[in-house]
Image (tube, helix red, strand yellow):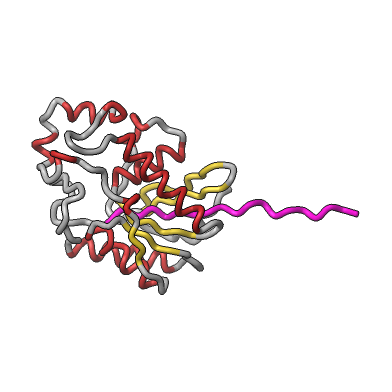
């Protein structure tokens, strides 16, 4: 009697969305400071991202960093799929410590900035988090949410550096090279996680259909 073939284990698809533009994007290192909301352009970006994700046949859950700009980006996405936004601290921005709120043009003049760009694995923000700790945190959050939504589709609205760190981990790329990855406001990065390991399907996608995202 022929043995029935077992179906291959299904993968869990994560859509990692960076929050939309704020009034200080590209000018200030906001970090975890409270009270920073989406700019009008960021609200439009969030609506556009929601429309792209709404075209997917099914989304199991929408999670967001606790910060306002992430929650405001997640809100139209969740509404489009008839879901509520769940808050997860694992998706938080990197803790920039004493650098929080500083102008980027000022920080770029510091000798430490070269380390941030070229050897981030060796750097800890004064009074804050290291890039290694940030990567462990975001990857652990994804692993936890993956266990909760096996075989499903999960949207996570986070921030540029944590998403870059998640992509680097999924690709087996050292954290010292993660600054070479670009994550634009309201871009979608898709990673499929299966027992065989992660597959990066798209990075920094800002337009077009997401419906055909499948591991090859």
**To which quarter of the image does residue 98 belong?**
top left
Asked whether 14 falls inside the magenta stretch, the response is yes
Out of 48 and 124, give the one closest to the viewer.
124
Residue 137 x %, y %: 36, 43
- Number of numbered markers: 0
Q: Is residue 206 visible?
A: no
Out of 93 and 53, give the one closest to the viewer.
93
Q: Residue at x 51, y 50 (%)?
A: 192
What is the quadrant of the N terminus in the image? bottom right
Residue 9 x %, y %: 63, 52
Residue 87 x %, y %: 33, 60
Classified by dominant secondary structure, the portion drawn in magenta counts as loop
**To which quarter of the image does residue 37 belong?**
bottom left
Q: Which residues are magenta?
A: 1-19
> Looking at this rendering, what residue extends furthest in the right direction?
1
Q: Is residue 93 left or right of residue 193?
A: left
Look at the picture and state if 101 lies above or below 171. Answer: below
Q: Residue at x 16, y 44 (%)?
A: 29
Q: Residue at x 31, y 67 (%)?
A: 75
Q: Residue at x 10, y 42 (%)?
A: 103
Q: Is residue 80 visible?
A: yes
Asked whether 9 falls inside the magenta stretch, the response is yes
């Amino acid at each position: 009697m022929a043995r029935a073939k077992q179906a291959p284990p299904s993968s869990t698809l994560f859509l990692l969305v960076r929050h939309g533009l704020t009034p200080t994007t590209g000018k200030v290192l906001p970090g975890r400071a409270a009270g920073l909301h989406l700019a009008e352009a960021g609200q439009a970006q969030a609506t556009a991202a929601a429309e792209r994700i709404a075209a997917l046949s099914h989304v199991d859950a929408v999670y967001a960093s606790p910060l306002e700009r992430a929650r405001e980006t997640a809100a139209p996405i969740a509404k489009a799929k008839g879901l509520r936004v769940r808050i997860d601290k694992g998706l938080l921005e990197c803790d920039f410590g004493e650098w929080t709120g500083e102008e980027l043009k000022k920080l770029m003049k510091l000798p430490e900035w070269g380390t941030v760009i070229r050897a981030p694995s060796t750097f800890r923000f004064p009074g804050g988090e290291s890039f290694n700790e940030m990567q462990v945190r975001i990857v652990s959050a994804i692993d936890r949410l993956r266990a909760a939504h096996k075989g499903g589709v999960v949207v996570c609205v986070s921030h540029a550096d944590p998403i870059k760190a998640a992509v680097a981990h999924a690709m087996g790329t050292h954290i010292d090279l993660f600054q070479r990855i670009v994550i634009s406001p309201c871009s979608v990065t898709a990673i499929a996680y299966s027992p065989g390991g992660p597959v990066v399907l798209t990075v920094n996608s800002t337009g077009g259909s997401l419906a055909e995202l499948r591991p090859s």
